[in-house]
Image: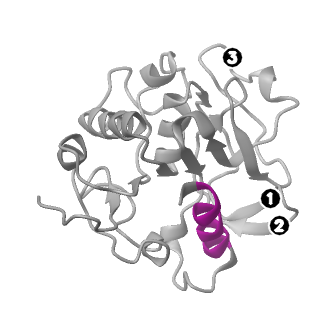
Amino acid sequence: MEVAEKTKVLTLGHVGRGTGALEPFDQVYPHSMLVTSQDIADGAEIDALVIWGGEDISPSYYNEAAAIGGSYAPNSPSRRDVIEASACRTAIDRGIPIIGVCRGAQLVCALAGGSLIQHVDNHGRTHDMMTKDGYVLATSSVHHQMQYPYDVEHELIAWAHPRRSSIYITEASENDLKMADKKEAEIVWYPKIKALGIQGHPEFHSNPRRDPFVQYCMKLVREYVL
């Protein structure tokens, strides 16, 4: 694929898979285009890489095995895992920021050196989150796994409010106590790899230019990613 010089491109790491395409990030990147991971490796001029939602990533990316009742993914990476992780690593090497949505947020957490809580409950529907600047917003966050960024450099931007899960399954425990004093991460910035992990789905909203959650995500993209 040829990309014109100085063209502003919003890049999606796995074309044809995942929950989204271009919207709503085309609000920030009006010249968005779909390009492949090979285009990224070949040096396409891009401004950001988006990794969308979908199935669990292999727990091997955060140095664990699938726990009983935990990850739905096999220990060996899937083809999608390999393609998206490769695209992210190339973006990191080139200093290109990443926006991870749902599965994508969990992948960037792992690539930043963090880990995942392999299973939580009561996160399977829209719920409230609290932001660092004091807003309470309804997020379309639908997931059974959770970013655990607390062992790596990060900025926690939003978290479930109030706490929702009664269990935190990891390889080490059926109810890992390391979450006892931690917030349930919803949006996280990973400065070392320039990645914004958004657990919710801004692409799910029918009126993205007015929805408060979507517009908050766009605000974060402008502040952290641009």
Q: Which residue is mark 2?
A: 136
In depth, the one of 141 and 52 nearer the eye is 52
Magenta span of residues: 213-224
Between the C-alphas of marks 3 and 1, the distance is: 29 Å
Residue type at mark 3 is: Ser
- Magenta segment, prevailing SS (helix, strand or loop): helix
The secondary element bearing badge 1 is classed as strand
> Which dot, 2 or 3, sits closer to the camera?
2
Residue visible at 31% across and 40% down in the picture: 87
The secondary element bearing badge 3 is classed as loop
Residue type at mark 1 is: Thr
Residue 141 in percent (x, y) is at 62, 58
Residue 124 in percent (x, y) is at 62, 54
208 vs 124: above or below: below
Residue visible at 37% across and 41% down in the picture: 91
- Compared across the picture, whether 34 is left or right of 106 comes to left
Q: Residue 173: which numbered mark, if any?
A: 3
Upstream in the sequence, badge 3 or badge 1? 1
Magenta highlight on residue 68? no
Q: Quadrant of the N terminus?
A: bottom left
Upstream in the sequence, badge 2 or badge 3? 2
Residue 196 in percent (x, y) is at 57, 49
